[in-house]
Amino acid sequence: MFTASHESIVWARTHKKSKHTFNYQAMKNGDWHEKDMIKKDAKQMRSVWSIPLTKKSEKRHGKHPTQKPEALLERIVLASTNPGDTILDPFCGSGTTGVVAVRRGRKFIGIDMDAHFLHDIAARRIDDELDILKTADTVDGAPTDADKFMADIKLEVSLARS
């Protein structure tokens, strides 16, 4: 029996006329071909990607049974969002989407049924990324203030709860 080694990505919208983001030029002209043997330089991104397994360093706060590699979420976030956008991950797990979101200047809301994964793994990973951002001057070329960024995220979460 073969081992499943793929992820299915669902692209959804709430209404037929809803607008979506697809950063065509970033997917076509990014440096993806340097790490992905399937991606051809200066050609549009295809639906099959070659991305390595989750790195050990991404599991330093603990393991999640369905943890995704940051490289996968990096590509999805850059393809389908713009800096300042809010990303909702209703199955947050180990927080990979949140790590990549804050790294790329996006706001993030994560939800998970399992408090252990949410607090012990995801929150720690995102906090580590925010600590790294505190020492950086920019995120995707825009000035950053990690404390303000975190305050904005907390405000969005509280508004979403009410």
Image (cartoon, helix red, strand yellow):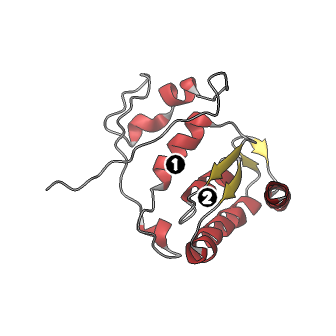
Q: Residue 114 location in percent, x, y?
A: 56, 73
Marks 2 & 1, CB-CB < 8 Å contact: yes
Q: Depth check: 161 or 148 in front?
A: 161
Q: Is residue 135 visible?
A: no
Residue found 47% across the figure and 35% down from its top: 31
Above/below status of 2 relative to 57 = above
Q: Position of residue 62 (x, y in %)?
A: 49, 76
Q: CA distance from mark 2 to mark 1?
A: 9 Å
Amino acid type of the residue tagged 1 in the rendering: Leu
Q: Is residue 148 left or right of residue 127?
A: right
Give, as a three-letter code, the residue at label 2. Answer: Val
Q: Nearer the viewer, residue 24 or 13?
A: 13
Element on which disc 1 rests: helix
Q: Is residue 162 visible?
A: yes
> Residue at 66% across / 21% down in the picture?
17
From the image, tell me which residue sits under label 1.
73
In the rendered view, would you say 80 is above or below 72? Answer: above
2 sits left or right of 57 in the view: left
Quadrant for residue 20, please give it: top right
Q: Residues within 10 Å of mark 1 (few under 14, many from 20)?
A: some
User: Circle 2 sits on which residue?
Assistant: 99
The vertical placement of 84 against 56, above or below, is above
Which residue appears farthest toward the left when viewing the image?
1
> Where residue 85 appears, x then y in whole percent?
73, 41
Quarter of the image for the C terminus: give it.
bottom right
Compared across the picture, whether 36 is left or right of 82 comes to left
